[in-house]
Image: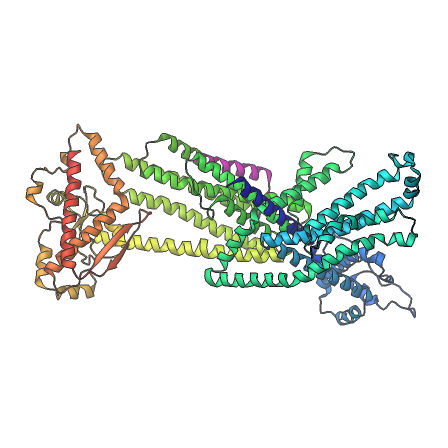
Amino acid sequence: MSVRTKVLGLVDVMMRVPPVMVIDEILKIGMGLPTRLYPEKSPGEIPAIESPPTESPPESNQDPFASIKEFFGLGGGDSIPPMTSAAVGAAQSALEQTIENASRSAQSHGMLSSGFNSLMDELSHDETLADVLSITTVKFVICLFGFLSAACIFMLWTRHLVMVYMFLTSLGLTFLSYWSNVSALALMERSPSILEDLMSLNTTRLLDSGGVVMSLAPHLMAQWFMGMLFAYIHLGPRLELLQKSMPIIFASPILVAMLPLPPKVVQHLPVVAAFTPIILTKITLLHSAMEASRTVYNGYQYAMNFVSNFGLSALIENEWQRLNVPNVLRVFWTIRIIQGGYALATTESEEPLELMPATQKLLVDGCETLTAVLGMTGVISMICHYIGRGFQWYLLTYDNDEEKSLGTVSAVLFYILALQTGLTSLSPDKRFIRLCRNLCLLMTALLHFLHNIVSPILMSLSAARNPSRKRHVRALTVCAFLVVMPVSLLYYLWSQRSISTWLLAVTAFSVEVIVKVLVSLATYTLFLLDARRQFFWEKLDDYLYYVRAFGNSVEFCFGILLFINGAWILIFESAQNATGGAIRAIMMCIHAYFNIWCEARAGWSVFMKRRSAVHKISALPEATPAQLQAFDDVCAICYQEMYSAKITRCRHFFHGVCLRKWLYVQDRCPLCHEIMMYTDKAEENAQEAEPAAAVQAEQPLRIYPRDDGNNAGAPRRTPERVPNEMPEAATTSSNAAAMIGAEAAAAIVDSAAAVGEARSLANVASSASQRISASGSSDSSFMTASAQPPPPTATSAAAVATAAASNTTHMFRMSQDQQ
């Protein structure tokens, strides 16, 4: 990216910051609606309710609002003063006190008490309440208009945004010129005549540093500069004579005021000078109104077409990148914090400014509104992004996927936490505590994400037999950090804080991280042990299943605990925050479905498949050593030597663990596609089959056809005949066979399927053959398969595949013998 592109991007970001600041100021005053101020009292303190006088003589001019005051607890003998402009500021606090008293009265007597109807009648004739509501309505309408205007300006394209700023700048120059002229004329009114001094060449007063001439010089220079700038940026008609005379028009009140004119004429000179730029601005506004409406309509059409073609999510993502929202929010929040810090630094106080209270004040003000929370979210996202990048650099791995980056995940999580805890509606002291708690929860989520980074690296290092100790040490160091960090955090929190729902949530997340790290380390250790073994380890998959089942069970239990904890918070602690309670309820539903129901259903499905496969495998006979010696071949699924095997009904030999994985997918033999587990209906069909198939099943089968001429020069070796002086070669052969993994299993199953097709077509003409192409998944406990009908030339294709499978097996055996 060139420097020019970076500079233009920065300019675009800076131009979009002022609309965000306008929106922030509007949200800070609550959209003009009366908001409840934070009381300067302790949380447990309850303001006293004034009791009405017990004795009050009846008077003819009795207060008509006595029942209202009695209902609200304001006293029956006091009279309500008329609403004036000076009392508008106090009306809000009085209204808040009234609402608070009404709440207590409603809780004690009920809203449907006998005096409620008379209360409503009197409120409808209350002039004070009518004045308050009318002022509130006007303020809300103005704030809503400003909010929508700022949002529309923020979303404009850069070209239109530049035009808006040029228009606003020209309008601002007009008013600034008017104020400068008014100030200059005020200086000239209190001073002697400048024209007389010029005519008499009174250099003493003209050159006096404190004189009127020296005071007017900055105003005159500013007017000339503003006139030239206005002539350059205004969007009205650009007449040549008007453009050249614009600086003189701006400075004309100061120049004309030197003449001996009546004071009334001099007083109106700034208005006359501002008349020309105002006319040009109005012409610009009238001409741009149609273009602005056309721009809005074109934007609407563009959005609708984009949604219809690509979807709403694609539109949001595209606009998010076009507007560069994260950088805009970060710049906005940084400017906001700088303003707050400058205000604290320039405040006159006898006590010196301390760092911790000032930091707390800035953080509290930095999450005062929703836009401020968004800005803080952008800054936290950037920090977490670079933390993730640092760990990836340390682990010597790089992932450029933005959707899965630590910055994106942390930003979404922090903003959801801020919304569901009602961060912006809390008082400053409670807001700081809640912010610290949210950051603590975010740190535990950061640990989960770091585990997701290091866990695949551990698996790849153990499965690939990577000899680089540097990468192993780095990954294990990160795992140690992921264990020590949550333990230290839990020790500090449980020693310094009392038990609460928040502490239970942090504890659950931290313990879950520790368990996940231990499960990853156990899996890593099992793979390393398997790499050092010389023979096939059939119990490896069982141990892996038990370890992962333990980890998943712990995560499932903690998921249920977090759901119960969230339900308690929703029912008993979120009563005062309706918006946060609604968001918490939605997040709890999502958590219950994805983290509890879906996980339970997936775990139960895996358990039932494994249980069914184990029962089916246990029903198959175990191969004896003599049968294995006579078979003298490798497993057709994993290419490993067989020291124990299961014999299918079609007389094929496989490892029990390999066959169990295959049974997760289907019940047919991987080679000949015969059903291994017969049901009653399958047995009836088998009895009706041709006798040739039964005779073929009874005969001992050679899995791979052999050419005696090709194999004569390559003596076969069984595991018992491996010489003792070559342990390294045997280990290398075993490791090379184990590294083939799922892809090799897929290839041999595909070739074996072709062999099965050839046998089926040659021996059983009435049965339809199927071809199965199997591919190994990343999980060692599952295999996937897809069945496809054979092509018209299935016989020739099966013959070619049979030959290829035979040659592949022969070459593999030759490589083992040579080693």
Q: Is residue 536 visible?
A: no
Name the foreground residue: 647 vs 453: 453
Q: Report the front residue among 307 and 518.
A: 307
x then y, percent, for residue 320? 54, 52
The image position of residue 756, as x and y in percent, is 16, 55
Q: Is residue 497 visible?
A: yes
Colouring convention used in this rendered image of the protein? rainbow
Q: Quarter holding the C terminus? A: top left
Residue 409 on image: x %, y %: 50, 47
User: Residue 485 in magenta?
Assistant: yes
Left or right of 240 in this view: 611 = left
Residue that lies at the very extreme toward the top in this rendered image: 725
Can you say whether 806 is above or below 693 in the image? above
Q: Residue at x 24, y 45 (%)?
A: 744
Instruction: Kindly identify the residue that appears in the image at 56 percent across and 39 percent down.
Output: 494
At which x and y percent is residue 394?
44, 34
Q: Locate residue 493: give its quadrant.
A: top right
Q: Main secondary structure of the magenta part?
A: helix
Q: Report whether 765 appears left or right of 426.
A: left
Using the rendered view, name the quadrant where residue 346 is placed: top right
Q: Which residues are magenta?
A: 479-501
Residue appearing at x 21%, y 36% in the figure: 733
As for residue 188 lying within the magenta part, the answer is no
